[in-house]
Amino acid sequence: MKHTVRTLLATSCAVLLVAVLPSAAPAATSPQAYQNQVKSQANAVRGFHDRQPLVHSACMDKWADSWAAHLAKIKQLKHRATSGGNGVTLTAIMRECKLKGIGENLASGGFPHGYAVVGVGRDTVQAKPANWMQSSGHRANLLGASYNRTGIGAARASNGDIYVVQLYGALR
């Protein structure tokens, strides 16, 4: 009996010490993991709203990756031009990736992981910063019934923020 009480007391003290001691900071989410989380959550939300899952497009990924890297470098959120302007436009991406429609969602900073960027099927609590499900334009892209392809890019800026780009498209 004494041995059992001592063991129980020693175990309780060890558990208490672990609970009181500061834990190591969680590892930062890698850009690749962030991309996977965004895709997984986007398809979960689409399923919740009776939409087909988005299929990965290597062509769209290439353009999402390059734009995410650009945004991380300049530390700003800027949508690509639809047409005209400098650089590769959404219209040019549509041609190259053989799409008949395209949408683009962007996010950075304040989101601990890719799931938080997308949000949940029915957001009732206002998250800060607002996620894609809380924005009518982002939500429309995410839930677009005609979209069936996606490309996702994520890049870490020098200040540690992750910039994420999700392209949505419909094949011709």
Image (cartoon, rainbow, N blue to C red):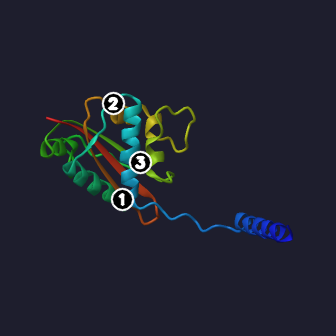
| Quadrant in the picture for residue 6 | bottom right
Q: Amino acid type of disc 1?
A: Gln
Task: Farthest residue to the front: give it.
Answer: 1
Residue under the image location 43 percent in, 50 percent down? 114
Residue under label 2: 51
Drawn side of residue 58 relative to residue 127, left or right? left
Closer to the chain start, of discs 3 and 1, is: 1
Asked if residue 97 lies left or right of residue 3, the reply is left
Pick the residue in front: 14 or 144.
Answer: 14
| Element on which disc 1 rests | helix
Residue 107: give its label. 3
Q: Which amino acid type is marked by label 2?
A: Arg
The residue most toward the right is 2
Q: CA distance from mark 2 to mark 3?
A: 22 Å
Residue contact at pointers 3 and 1, CB within 8 angstroms = no
Image quarter (top left, top right, bottom left or bottom right) of the C terminus:
top left
* Residue named by callout 1: 32
